[in-house]
Amino acid sequence: MKEIKPTIVVFGCTGTVGTEVMRQLNGIDCIARGVLRNPERPYPVLKNSLPSNITYVSADLNSGEQLREACLGADALFLLTATSPDQVAHEMNIIDAAKKSGVKRIVKLSSPIVPLPAKVEVSQWHSKIDEHLSQNIEDFCCLRPHSFMQNWERNVFTIQYFGKIFGALGDAPRNYVDCRDVATVAVNNLLSPLALTERSIVLAGPQAITNIEMAAKLSRITGRKIDYVNITPEALFNQLTRKAKLPEWLANHIVELDDLAIKVPEPERDTITDLILRKPRIMDEYLQESRHHFKRKPLWKLLL
């Protein structure tokens, strides 16, 4: 008798990590079901005319009925929704629907546990969701990366047009991990034949890097001088809300992350080699592959 393939449901399948989870599940002996919030959203991993293990459904994250249908028949679930003030409600809704649909395992992308005196509001959101998860699902784990290398793509505007990085980090280093390595850890846990024993997994990359060092790395791969400009948290918040037009909660989150790295030193070496059975990617690899994001653009294009 042939073994039945597991069905893996992926929430956040169009996001940075979720897309990579779908890519890595593609072709593996399972059914990977990506959940789209908008049925018109392009598929992150395209289906071809050949038989495929990739499928998609759409669901409103506020609809318990639609979420239960999205989870129907699933064995495991990857949990990640867009960071926003609605994230707590959305992810709790998904956990409740998964439980009612008989999902046995959830692998959640969470955040580092923040000790006092630092404060990160988004981490408090994750703590509420993590607690709800632990109360409702027996087989689960929370993955806790510090910062993704891919988050540097948020800074492309000032790098491209002005050759500058703005922040309130001073000379404190931050630990970065490639989202592809995080996805590998997630996939390994989703497909493990054994019950998950580690409930909280800190995912640290191989290096802790300052913004000053990042400016030097970006200077090398772009072929021009990139400077780091250290400003006050208040000035950074104002710049993010008034010039970048970010919502206040997101601007505050970015400021809080800089403050966290100053108050609580981040890991300087990786924690995931044993989890993925290879060395994790380093920042220089990511920057070399992604250098097109940071190339100079003339200021006159701002007027177009």
Image (cartoon, rainbow, N blue to C red):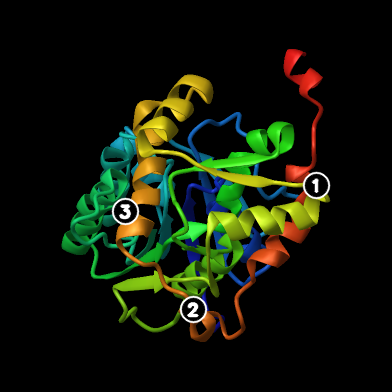
Point 47% across, 29% down: residue = 240
Earlier residue among tags 1 and 3: 3
Whole-number angstrom distance, CA of label 1 to CA of label 3: 50 Å
Mark nearer the viewer, 1 or 3? 1
Res 154 → quadrant: top right
Residue 51 shows in the view: no
Mark nearer the viewer, 2 or 3? 2
Q: Position of residue 105 (x, y in %)?
A: 35, 67
Question: Element at badge 2?
Answer: loop
- Quadrant where the N terminus is found in the figure: bottom right
Q: Is residue 85 above or below residue 148?
A: above
Point 69% across, 33% down: residue = 162
Question: Element at badge 3?
Answer: helix
What type is the residue that disc 3 sits on? Ala
Residue beneath label 2, please? 269
Mark nearer the viewer, 1 or 2? 1
What type is the residue that disc 1 sits on? Arg
Whole-number angstrom distance, CA of label 2 to CA of label 3: 35 Å
Whole-number angstrom distance, CA of label 1 to CA of label 2: 29 Å
Earlier residue among tags 1 and 2: 1
Label 1 packing within 10 angstroms: few (<14), some (14-19), many (20+) = few
Residue beneath label 1, please? 224
Disc 1 + disc 3, Cβ < 8 Å: no
What type is the residue that disc 2 sits on? Arg
Q: Position of residue 93 (x, y in %)?
A: 28, 43
Task: Decide which of 40, 303 is in the foreground and name it.
Answer: 303
Question: Element at badge 1?
Answer: loop
Residue beneath label 3, please? 98
